[in-house]
Amino acid sequence: MVRAVVLSLVLVVAGWGLIAPARHFVFTAASAQDDTPENSGLPAGPGREEVFYLCQACHSLRTVLQQRLPRWEWGYTLDWMVEEQGMAELDPEERELILNYLGTYLSATSPR
């Protein structure tokens, strides 16, 4: 008897598990990642395209958009990604362009 009840509960939970997750995978335009710098949510400015392609190669741009770090901390983050996460070293001009963009448009003091 106990075995039948447990088996019934397992089947009900398993059946619910097959149906319920579909509700959680509703995609909207706001949650879909756009494939162009202009539609990415990154503010317009010199360096946006470089940030777009560099950052989304490894993670969501939402990760970048939510950080709001000062320029020096963005620099530390880039160093950490090269040293610990396997990101390719940037050439000095590209690094400067990216850091200027991040520090100007995605810092705690820049408008949202």
Image (tube, rainbow, N blue to C red):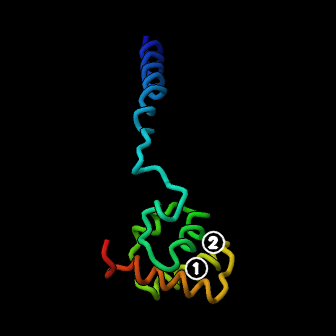
In percent of the image, x 38 and y 79: which residue is there?
Answer: 107
Q: Secondary structure at mark 1?
A: helix
Q: Compare residues 55 and 18 and report the one nearer the observer.
A: 55
Looking at the rendered image, the quarter that the C terminus falls into is bottom left
Residue 59 picture quarter: bottom right
Q: Compare residues 74 and 38 and report the one nearer the observer.
A: 38
Crowdedness near tag 2: few (<14), some (14–19) or many (≥20) residues, C-alpha within 10 Å: few
Residue 52 picture quarter: bottom right
Provide residue 89's location: percent of width, then percent of height. Answer: 67, 81
Outermost residue on the top side: it is: 1
Provide residue 13's location: percent of width, then percent of height. Answer: 43, 25
The reply to whether dot 2 and dot 1 touch (C-beta < 8 Å) is: yes
Residue type at tag 1? Trp
Q: Compare residues 34 and 85 and report the one nearer the observer.
A: 34
Query: Which sits earlier in the primary sequence, circle 2 or circle 1?
Result: 1
In percent of the image, x 56 and y 88: which residue is there?
Answer: 96
Q: Secondary structure at mark 2?
A: helix
Is 16 drawn above or below residue 83 in the view shown?
above
Is 57 drawn above or below residue 11 in the view shown?
below
Residue type at tag 2? Gln
Q: Which residue is mark 2?
A: 85
Q: Please tell me the numbered disc located at residue 80.
A: 1
Residue 109 picture quarter: bottom left
Q: CA distance from mark 2 to mark 1?
A: 7 Å
Q: Compare residues 94 and 61 and report the one nearer the observer.
A: 94
Looking at the rendered image, the quarter that the N terminus falls into is top left
Is 79 drawn above or below residue 43 in the view shown?
below
Q: Please tell me the numbered disc located at residue 39.
A: none
In percent of the image, x 41 and y 83: which residue is there?
Answer: 104
Provide residue 44's location: percent of width, then percent of height. Answer: 43, 72
Provide residue 105's location: percent of width, then percent of height. Answer: 40, 78
